[in-house]
Image (cartoon, rainbow, N blue to C red):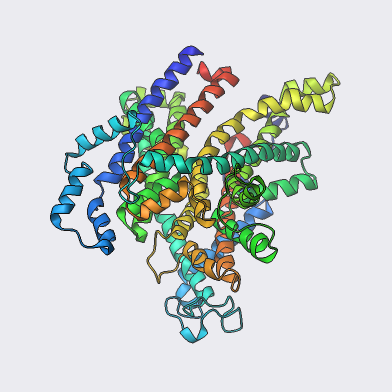
C-alpha cells in the first residue's frame, strides 16, 4: 500500500484530532519492551545517584580475609581477590558508565550538531571541508580511534570521554547535515529569508527545532553504544584507575578466576548488556513515536 | 556511471589525505615523548645515556620538524616502507604482514557468516512475520547488538572450553598446518566477531523486506499468481538487499574493531592484538601505520559500497 493511499483514506475517515503529546504517549508506551527498558534505566539511574546508600560494602577497600568468596548472604555476588564486594562495585560502576555516557553524548552532540548545521547551511567550501573531515573520522572504527587517543593521552576517565567524543562527533554531524539540507528546501525558509531573516535566526528558529526528534533518538541509541565502548576500553585497561569501579575492567579482572568464580566476570557483563539493551529499546520506542512518517500508522 | 565513479574516487582521495593527517597529528601532537617512554621501558637492559637517546632520536628522525616527519612518513608509505617499530626493532610492514593473514582469516569468516546468516534470518523473520520464528529472530537480533563482545568470549570459553572441554580456549593455528585444529580454534573467535554484524544485518534485512513486500510491484506479482518462491527470490530479495549492503560496508569496520577485543580475549596473534600491545608500549610507529592501514581498508570498502550502491540504485548516481 502506498503512502499516498494511506493519507487519502485517513483523510476520508477524518479521525478526531489527537494531540501530539497524546499520540506520542500512546505509541511510546505501546510496546512492553520499551516499558521494560524505561524501568531498567530508571532503576539504573536511581542506583547511580544513590550508590552511597545502596552499596552494602565499601567498593574500594576489601577485607582480605574474605578473598574470592562465592555468593553468600553477606556478599550476594561474592568477592574478588582483594575481598572487595562485587555487588557494591557493580553499583558504583553504574556511576562510571552513566557519567562517561552522558558527558560524552553532551560534548559530541553539541559539537556534531553545530558542525552539521554549519556545513548544511553554509554549503560550498565550508560544507566540503567539514563533511570530508567527518568522512575521514568515520574511516576509523570507534573503538580503535578511542583506543589510540586514550593511549596517547594516557589513562584516566577524562581522556576516555575525550576519545569517545571525538569518535562519535561525525555521527551527529552527518544526521544534522542531512536534516539541515532537507529543512532548507521548505518554502517557509524561503519566506523567512524574503522577510530578511539572517542565517543565524533561521538556523536557530527553524532548522534546530526540526532536528530535535531524530536527535533525541540518536542520542538515546548512542548512550547504549557509548556505555558498551567505555566497557570495552576499560576491559582493555584504559579508563578509570584502580581501585575505581568500571564494569569492563571488572570483567577483565574476573578472567583469571573464571573457572572457580565465574560470577566475577558474568555479573558485570550481564549488567552491561541489560543497560545497553534498555537504551536500545527506549531508543527504538522513541523513534516509532517521533517519526512523522509513521504518523497515523501506529 | 563513469562520472559518478570518478567523482567518488576524487572524494576518496581527499578523504584519504585527511585520514593520514588525523592519524599522524593525533598521535604526534599530543603530549608524551615516545622516545623517552621507550627508553624508560627498556631500562632493564642497562641505562642509556642522554647521548644515546639523542642518537636514537636522530635514527628515528624525531629531531626533524613535525611537517618534515609527516612528509617523510607519507613518502615512506608510498614506497612500501611503513617504518621501524621501536618496540619490536622490526619493520612495521613485516610485523603487519605476519599478522594480517590471521586477522583476515578470522575476519573474513566472521564477515561471511554475519552476512549470510544475518540476511537469511532477517528474510525469514519478515516473511513469517508475527510467528514464533519472527519473535525468536527479532529477540536474537535485539540482544545480539547489545552483547559486549569480550564478555561473550569469556562466556564461550567458560562453557565450551572449560566446562564441556569441546574447544581449545585460546591461540591460533594456521589452516594450512592443521586444518581441523585451526577450525576448532577459530569457532569461538568467529562467533564473537560476527555476532554484532549478524544481529544488525538481520534487523536491517527484516525491516527492509517488510517495506519492499508492501510495494505495488510485489502485489502485482502476487496477483499474477506467481509462486511465493519466485516472488521472494526475484522481486523481494534483490530490492531489499540494497540497504543491507551499506551495513555490510560498516561490518568491515566492526570486524577490525572487534578483532582488537577478540584477539585479546583469545590470545590470537593478529593485527588487533599487535595494535593493543603497541598502544600500551607507546610504539607510535606501529600504532600510526597500523591504524592507517585499517582506516584505508575501511575507506576502500566504503567506496566499494558507495559505487555498488550507485550501480544498484540508479536514483543515487543522478542525485
Front position in the image: B102 or A51: B102
Res A191 seen here: no
The answer to whether residue A194 is above or below residue B113 is above
Whole-percent x, y for residue B4 in the image = 47, 16
Q: Position of residue B40 (x, y in %)?
A: 25, 60
Residue pictured at 56% horizontal, 59% vertical: B151
Give the image location of residue B133, x and y in percent: 78, 45
**Residue at the location (71% across, 25% down)?**
B215
Quarter of the view holding residue B78: top left
Q: Nearer the viewer, residue B167 or A141?
A: B167
Residue lying at the far left of the rendered structure:
B51
Quadrant the N terminus of chain A occupies: top right
| Residue A191 image point, x, y percent | 40, 24
Is residue B297 shown left or right of residue A122?
Answer: right
The residue at 56%/50% (across/down) is: B172
Along the line of sight, the residue nearer the viewer: B74 or A207? B74
Does B265 appear above or below B134?
below
- Location of the C terminus of chain A by quadrant is top right
In this orientation, which residue lies closer to the viewer: B167 or A285?
B167
Q: Residue furthest bottom?
A: A65
Query: In the picture provided, is B51 more to the left or to the right than B172?
Result: left
- Name of the residue lying farthest toward the front: B177
Q: How many marks overall?
A: 0
Does residue A32 appear anywhere in the picture?
A: yes
**Rendered position, A248 above or below B207:** below
Amino acid at each position: 500500500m502506498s503512502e499516498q493511499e494511506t493519507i487519502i483514506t485517513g483523510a476520508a475517515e477524518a479521525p478526531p484530532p489527537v494531540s501530539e503529546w497524546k499520540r506520542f504517549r500512546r505509541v511510546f508506551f505501546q510496546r512492553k519492551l520499551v516499558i521494560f527498558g524505561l524501568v531498567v534505566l530508571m532503576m539504573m539511574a536511581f542506583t547511580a545517584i544513590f550508590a552511597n546508600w545502596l552499596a552494602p560494602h565499601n567498593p574500594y577497600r576489601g577485607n582480605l580475609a574474605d578473598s574470592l568468596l562465592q555468593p553468600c548472604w553477606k556478599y550476594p555476588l561474592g568477592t574478588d581477590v582483594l575481598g572487595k564486594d562485587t555487588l557494591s562495585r557493580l553499583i558504583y560502576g553504574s556511576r562510571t558508565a552513566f557519567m562517561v555516557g552522558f558527558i560524552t553524548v553532551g560534548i559530541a552532540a553539541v559539537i556534531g550538531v553545530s558542525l552539521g548545521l554549519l556545513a548544511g547551511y553554509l554549503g560550498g567550501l565550508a560544507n566540503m571541508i567539514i563533511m570530508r573531515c567527518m568522512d575521514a573520522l568515520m574511516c576509523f572504527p570507534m573503538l580503535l580511534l578511542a583506543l589510540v587517543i586514550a593511549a596517547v593521552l594516557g589513562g584516566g576517565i577524562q581522556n576516555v570521554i575525550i576519545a569517545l567524543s571525538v569518535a562519535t562527533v561525525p555521527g551527529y554531524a552527518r544526521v544534522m547535515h542531512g536534516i539541515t539540507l532537507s529543512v532548507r528546501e521548505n518554502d517557509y525558509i524561503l519566506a523567512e529569508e524574503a522577510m530578511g531573516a539572517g542565517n543565524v535566526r533561521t538556523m536557530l528558529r527553524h532548522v534546530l527545532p526540526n532536528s530535535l526528534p531524530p536527535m533525541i533518538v540518536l542520542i538515546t541509541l548512542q548512550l547504549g553504544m557509548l556505555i558498551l565502548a567505555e566497557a570495552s576500553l576499560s576491559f582493555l585497561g584504559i579508563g578509570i584507575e584502580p581501585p575505581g569501579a568500571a564494569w569492563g575492567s571488572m570483567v577483565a579482572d574476573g578472567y583469571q578466576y573464571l573457572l572457580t568464580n565465574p560470577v566475577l566476570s558474568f555479573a558485570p557483563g550481564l549488567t552491561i548488556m541489560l543497560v545497553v539493551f534498555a537504551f536500545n529499546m527506549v531508543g527504538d520506542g522513541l523513534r516509532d513515536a517521533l517519526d512523522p512518517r509513521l504518523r497515523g500508522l501506529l | 556511471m563513469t562520472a559518478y565513479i570518478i567523482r567518488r574516487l576524487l572524494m576518496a582521495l581527499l578523504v584519504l589525505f585527511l585520514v593520514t593527517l588525523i592519524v599522524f597529528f593525533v598521535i604526534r601532537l599530543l603530549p608524551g615523548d615516545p622516545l623517552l617512554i621507550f627508553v624508560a621501558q627498556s631500562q632493564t637492559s642497562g641505562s642509556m645515556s642522554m647521548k644515546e637517546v639523542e642518537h636514537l632520536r636522530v635514527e628515528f628522525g624525531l629531531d626533524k620538524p613535525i611537517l618534515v616527519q609527516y612528509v617523510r612518513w607519507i613518502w615512506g608509505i608510498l614506497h612500501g616502507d611503513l617504518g621501524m617499530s621501536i618496540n619490536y626493532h622490526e619493520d612495521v610492514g613485516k610485523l603487519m604482514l605476519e599478522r594480517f593473514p590471521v586477522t583476515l582469516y578470522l575476519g573474513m569468516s566472521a564477515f561471511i557468516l554475519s552476512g549470510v546468516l544475518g540476511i537469511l534470518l532477517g528474510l525469514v523473520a519478515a516473511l513469517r512475520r508475527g510467528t514464533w520464528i519472527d519473535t525468536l529472530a527479532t529477540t536474537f537480533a535485539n540482544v545480539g547488538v547489545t552483547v559486549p563482545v569480550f564478555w561473550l568470549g569469556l562466556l564461550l570459553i567458560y562453557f565450551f572450553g572449560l566446562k564441556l572441554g569441546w574447544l581449545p580456549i585460546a591461540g591460533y593455528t594456521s589452516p594450512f598446518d592443521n586444518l581441523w585444529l585451526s577450525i576448532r580454534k577459530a569457532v569461538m573467535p568467529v562467533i564473537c566477531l560476527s555476532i554484532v554484524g549478524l544481529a544488525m544485518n538481520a534487523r536491517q534485512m527484516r525491516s527492509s523486506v517488510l517495506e519492499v513486500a508492501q510495494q505495488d510491484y510485489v502485489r502485482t506479482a502476487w496477483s499474477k499468481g506467481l509462486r511465493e518462491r519466485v516472488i521472494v527470490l526475484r522481486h523481494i530479495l534483490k530490492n531489499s538487499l540494497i540497504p543491507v549492503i551499506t551495513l555490510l560496508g560498516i561490518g568491515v569496520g566492526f570486524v577490525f574493531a572487534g578483532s582488537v577485543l577478540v584477539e585479546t580475549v583469545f590470545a590470537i596473534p593478529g593485527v588487533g592484538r599487535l595494535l593493543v600491545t603497541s598502544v600500551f608500549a607507546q610504539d607510535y610507529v606501529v600504532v600510526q601505520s597500523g591504524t592507517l592501514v585499517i582506516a584505508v581498508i575501511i575507506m576502500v570498502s566504503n567506496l566499494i559500497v558507495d559505487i555498488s550502491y550507485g550501480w544498484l540504485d540508479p536514483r543515487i548516481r543522478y542525485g
